[in-house]
Amino acid sequence: MLGARSMQTPQALNAAFASGRPHDVIVETLRFAGAKGILDVGCGEGRLVARLIEEGFEAVGADPNPQVLETARANAPGARFADAGAEMLPFEDGGFDAVVFLNSLHHVPVGSMARALGEARRIGREGGPVVIVEPLAEGSYFEAMQPVEDETAIRHAAGVAIADAVRAGWFGLKGNVVFAATSRFANAEEFVASLIAVDPARTASAERRRAEVERRFRECSQKDEGGFRLVQPLRIYWLAIQKN
């Protein structure tokens, strides 16, 4: 794994980290880097694309799931979306100022993670940022979801793939920081539904292990006025593309 480094950041980016909201962190990171044209790899329902456009960026999304892309197009009307996986992106070399993976690299098959990072390097400009936000295998959110899908190994593999790409000289490491994201749910049923929405392949496991998930949700969550709170530590890797 890469050793932790602190980022020399302006007040707005420091505030974004303190907020624990991944979209805020990404927006301020990209703004600080001076990026304009952004590709969100594994964009899901397009919420980050919509936020980036709202903030004045030119954002494009890519995802291999046609069903979630329908929702993405509704969430970000007029935005461009591509039905494509991270391993084979239908974009020209150097066509983007920056590339973002938000909780998506660990959903790429382990054997294809290096290829996905290579594609990010190919389509980004020299020196442009690649911003990768990955969940760690810890925290109350992770503990509650484990009966549905234990991502310990795959999350570790994503970190290894990033470290290998840096060691290979594909990227320079500008920052590597952990922050905590908080999610709130009205009840355990809403939590289970959110896990399935992220990956419909979890449906059978979620139904089969529902009682265990609900028990863990009760044990791991903290009650507050917004419902029940779960915390997921996230690591943000701020990389700079190196092509020569």
Image (cartoon, grey):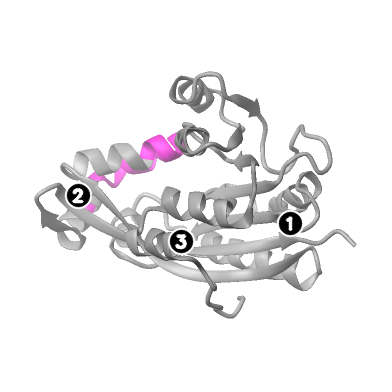
Seen in the picture, residue 52 relative to 159 is either above or below; the reply is above
- Write the residue at 46% across / 37% down: 51
Q: Position of residue 214 (x, y in %)?
A: 19, 49
Q: Amino acid at mark 3?
A: Leu
Which circle, 2 or 3, is nearer the viewer? Answer: 3
Residue 114 disc label: 1
What's drawn in magenta, residue-wise? 196-212
Query: Is residue 100 something that shows in the picture?
Result: yes
Q: Residues within 10 Å of mark 3 (few under 14, many from 20)?
A: many
- Write the residue at 54% across / 72% down: 7
Disc nearer the start of the sequence (1/2): 1
Seen in the picture, residue 203 relative to 144 is either above or below; the reply is above
Position of residue 130 in the picture relative to residue 119 (left or right): left
Which circle, 3 or 1, is nearer the viewer? Answer: 3
- Between 47 and 33, the one lying in front of the other is 33
Q: Residues within 10 Å of mark 2 (few under 14, many from 20)?
A: some
The CA span between labels 3 and 1 is: 29 Å
On whether residue 203 falls in the magenta region, the answer is: yes
Residue 214 disc label: 2
Q: Amino acid at mark 1?
A: Ala
User: What residue is pinned by disc 3?
Assistant: 13
Seen in the picture, residue 189 relative to 183 is either above or below; the reply is above
Q: Position of residue 194 (x, y in %)?
A: 33, 39
Q: State whether the magenta stretch is mostly helix, strand or loop.
A: helix
Q: Position of residue 54 (x, y in %)?
A: 47, 33
The kind of secondary structure element at disc 3 is helix
Position of residue 206 in the picture relative to residue 199 (left or right): left
Q: Position of residue 122 (x, y in %)?
A: 81, 48
| Quadrant containing the N terminus in the rendered view | bottom right
Q: Residues within 10 Å of mark 1 (few under 14, many from 20)?
A: many
The CA span between labels 2 and 3 is: 36 Å
Q: Amino acid at mark 2?
A: Glu
